[in-house]
Amino acid sequence: MSDLIELQRANLLSLLSEIETPHNVKFLVIDSEVERFLSFLFVNPGDLLRHVTAVDRIDSPHRKGQPSVEVIYLLKPNKYNINCIDVDFRLRPPKYRRSHVRFLPGTGPEMVDYFKSKRYIPQYLATIKEVELSFIPKETQFFLTMDIDRPLQLFFNKQCINLIDRTIKRTIHSLLNLCVVTGEYPIIRYSQPQTNEEKLTPATLLAKRIAFEFQTTLDNYAREHQEYPPPSQRPRAVCLITDRCLDLFSPVLHDFTYRSMVYDLVSDVDPSTDIYHYTAENEKGEQEEKSSKLLDLLDPDWQELKNQHIVDANEYLSGRIKEMIAKNPLLVDRSNVKTTTDLLSVVAHLKDFDEERRRIILHKTLIETCLQANQERKLAESADVEQNLAGFGLDIDGEKVKNITYNLLEILSMKESNVIDKIRQIIIYALYRGGIIEQDFVKLLAFIGIESNHDFFSHFMLLFKNFDQVGFQLIKQEPKAKPYKKQWFHDPIVKDPSVYNTSRFIPAVGNILSKIIANPLLLSEEFFPYVKDKPIELLEEEEGSGYTAAANGSASLRNPRHKAAWTKNNTNPKRAPRQRFFYYIIGGVTQSEIKAVYEQAELKNRDVFLGSDGIITPLSFMKSIENLTSERKNLQLKDDEAEKEKPPDFMLDVFTPVAPPVSHVQYLPKKQPPHSAPASTQSGKPGQSASSESAGDEKAPGKEKKKRSKFSKLLKPNKKK
């Protein structure tokens, strides 16, 4: 199975190794954006030091430099970074011998002109290039586009329409980066909105626009790089570009996978950094404040547990604890062990298993926190109704549920559920019904204690109304109006005793991937067209089998006759490399969708990579929907922040005199000619000559002024723009 982390790491190291320097000694200078990027590729910064001599932040006060060494700048293209580079070479001697500038994608004409306007950079510039490093490999099969903040606002808020172009460029570069590191030239398909969705919000057409522009970018890259794509026996990859509007159930449905519960329920987990802050017992029996990063690269136990149901994860970890204790019977007093909490305390006091023990304590603490939240909010009790609503009204036996509205009112009346869970459930119900009238929303809010005079009433009503912005009319105009028509692509699991009743929902990404991997003809071209004509072998297969692409039922996935396509050119299909599938979601992805990709990759034995521009939870999704009609000035977007341009003061201090210049030029007294009168008698002032001395005084200041002006010019900061 291919690994995105390894592929991107190899890509980066290849970019660094192709830069030749004397004796292969090279410094690497990065910014905060690249520093975050590297944290997903290397366990610690020391791993990168095998490939470069030193790694420094460009604005670090501890960066020393070495005038005899060449430097690689790997930076985001902005005025701040360019000015910092210029300052490095304004020094005398300069901080480095020569520079190799490598900018991340996004170097527009304005930034190119600004770079060229610098006075000192060109004198020491060896090479300059824009490199394809545009996505962060968060996991082995999941990546995030770099430098996109709050994607739902950028793509679906009409106030942000002039930010769409730059956001699309970032998206396309991340997809191109994916193709470069995998060596794939994929066949591109995209999700096509229905007419009523397009009328509600033109943003539903963004997937089509990105698909076509990506195709053009990919074609141009192939023309400019003769080595791309590299020769391969692997069947041609498929890239499917969709948006958040395709599946609106996934972001509001509670998922019981360990990873989902961690990010949805545990407030001590920071989604932006993946850091979990917690308190745990140490060997001395004392409670300590700890923190840990939940990343595959750093934590193999997280990688093992994250996609398991919370019950399975708990059992698995309890087994690990018992196994550790069983291997160390002499170190454990089992007489006091009665509960899992006691077991955890025993593990905390074990010695000589620091790293393994730390991870077990971390995950046992985290799982217990999730289970406690589940119990307090009665999530398992309401999950059956949520699953039935999301499953088109079918229960686990595949039977139509009767009195489903009454079932909804039952879970809304539970005192233990919090308001956010109840709002989620109202939204799920309205999606299932194809929308309900405004008065019904008012009644449901009143039923859960949110009257019209409540502080949150207007916020929740705005949330319901703003679903228009993501292509679904949640509020119907009148009771007799037909339900809003939308083609759904998710699927429920029925009649399967091996599946938890709380986890029967298959997100659209899982269902779509299942079909397209089994046979591309199973995925309707009406809803998922090709950017270019579909492959000729598919046309032949379609004609030969008499199969029509309109078939859209999930039952056909179980038909063994449906084989994966694009293997005819391989003389021995069994030994041929596996076909790859790329799936990109515009507007953010949920943890349950990431899990679905891993499941399909394992079930179908294929390389499947999922990408998006952000990770969303039920709460963050609902907040974003509410803000889709907010004024842009109130959104506080990263793209609207004023970018700093001036380098840090400590970098400029070297050019600023600490005190007014003091002249150290000394003048010898003018030698008096023989028989001349004393100077005092000629000038009328002691020690001053009226002729020769005065002439000497006029000349000396002139020399001093000339020398001082040259020195000042050398040290004076360059003001040329």
Image: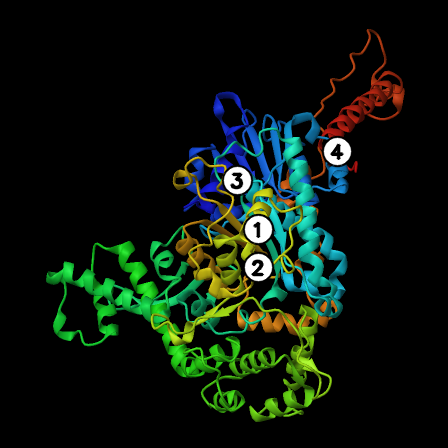
Tell which tag, 1 or 4, sits nearer the viewer. Answer: 1
Circle 1 SS class = helix
Q: Amino acid at mark 2?
A: Gly
Which residue in the protein does label 3 denote? 181
First along the sequence among labels 3 and 1: 3
Q: Are marks 1 and 4 in contact (CB under 8 Å)?
A: no
Alpha carbon of mark 3 to alpha carbon of mark 4: how far? 30 Å
- N-terminal of the two: label 2 or label 4? 4
On-image quarter of the C terminus: top right
Are dots 3 and 2 in contact, CB under 8 Å? Answer: no
Residue at 76%, 40% (x, y): give it. 109
> Residue under circle 2?
614
Residues under labels 2 and 1: Cα distance?
37 Å
> Is residue 592 in view from this perspective?
no
Q: Gap in Å between the C-alphas at discs 2 and 4?
A: 34 Å
Residue placed most toward the observer, 502 or 92:
502
Question: How many marks are shown on the rendered structure?
Answer: 4
- Which residue bears the numbered disc 4? 116
Marks 2 and 4: which is nearer the front? 2
Q: Check disc 1 and give the amino acid type.
A: Glu
Q: Earlier in the sequence, mark 1 or mark 4?
A: 4
Compute the Cα span from label 3 to label 2.
Answer: 21 Å
